[in-house]
Image (spheres, rainbow, N blue to C red):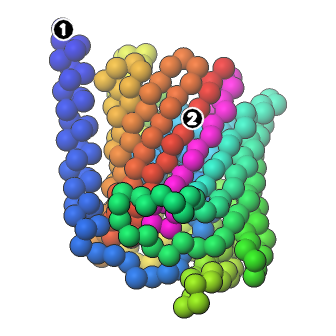
Amino acid sequence: MKKREKYSVYTVFIFSFIILLASPSILMGQLTISEENRGTLEIHKFDTRSLSMGSATVSDAYGRVSMGVNPALTGLFNKRISINSNSNHSWDTNLLRYDATLPTLIVGQHHITARVGMLNSGYDEINYLGSAQFPEPDVNQYHADLTYAFAITEVFSVGLLQSLSYSFNDDAQYLTYFTDFGIAYAPAENISYGLVLRGIGREVEYEIIETGETTLRSNTIGQKLEVGATFRFPVEQRRPYMTLSLANEKRFGEDGLWYKAGLELLPYRFLAVRGGVQFRSVDVIFLPRAGLGFNTDYFRLDYMVAPRNQRGENFHQLGLTFQF
């Protein structure tokens, strides 16, 4: 009886947390509409669980499929085989992105993981959420990522992510490349730390001009340095009921820091409730996230949503992970 009461308290708390995070951004979405017809093709592909926790999981050694968050995390994988796929859709641009992460190949202290994916336009017939459609960019992209992690010890790992993307439409084609470097340290089951240097390379930007055509160009990526810690509670239990991830990110060329926080509660063995936020104090930017996960011994189904916010984000993502 006491356990059920504890689970109920956890569930009520996280739903209240999610509603509190989402409500300001939903109001913001009703009052403001971006007039910009340009954007950047996202180069870092995060799994659905990480996104729902505000992408604060740079140190979460138990994320298992977070190679896009921190390439060193793959060096702390257990012996279970994991296959992960995600589908991301933007309500504003109608761009759809798919990716699939293959099982990690482990040879001694060496861990190698590959991921492939693509991006294209969604279905024009659907008027999402009943709102007016924004101009849709005409662009396609294929990408392949390869992560190498070296487990120096059972609790300390370094990793390198190499990514190659081919972006194109009828008028232009760009082949771009970037690399990330990460460190992961998990001295105990209930706590882990992480560091990652992102964005050494180039990315592709698009712009919809007055004629309705989409132009593409390639630019140097802005570098970022991120550090974080993850805590799991309770310590004495085999299965944690709560995971808290915190991270600070420095984007070079920008003033101030980005602060990230993600919370995951497991009121029941099969259910995970998640919320996250990214916050920048210099200009008071607040980006909320929320998500759910359904777990079994052999697969996990995840869903997350980023409601409209001050950065114009308005997307959702579905993820499926198989474990053997």
Residue 1 got which mark?
1
Vertical relation: 226 (above or below) 137: above
| Residue 319 on image: x %, y % | 54, 40
Quick one: 289 or 98, which is closer to the camera?
A: 98
Quarter of the rendering occupied by the N terminus: top left
Q: Which residue is drawn at 63% across and 50% down?
A: 98
166 above or below 126? below
Residue range corresponding to the magenta coloring = 76-94
Q: Is residue 8 left or right of residue 134?
A: left
Label 2: which secondary element: strand
Q: What element carries label 1?
A: loop
In this view of the protein, can residue 159 be seen by the observer? Answer: no
Residue 10, given in percent of the width and then of the height, sits at: 24, 29
Q: Is residue 135 visible?
A: yes
Residue furthest front as drawn: 125
Q: Which of 190 and 152 is in front in this view?
A: 190
Q: Where is residue 59 in the image (x, y as percent from the top left)?
A: 50, 44
Earlier in the chain: of badge 1 and badge 2, it is: 1
Which tag is nearer the camera, tag 1 or tag 2?
2
Q: Does the magenta stretch include residue 82?
A: yes
Q: Which amino acid does label 2 sit on?
A: Leu
Query: On the image, numbered disc 2 is attached to which residue?
Result: 320
Q: Tell me the amino acid under the disc marked 1.
A: Met
Left or right, residue 120 beside residue 311: right
Residue at 34%, 20% in the rendered image: 268
Q: How far apart are marks 1 and 2 (CA)?
A: 33 Å
Q: Does the magenta stretch include residue 74?
A: no
Residue shown at 25% from the left, 68% from the top = 30
Quadrant containing the C terminus in the rendered view: top right
Front residue (pair 223, 17): 17
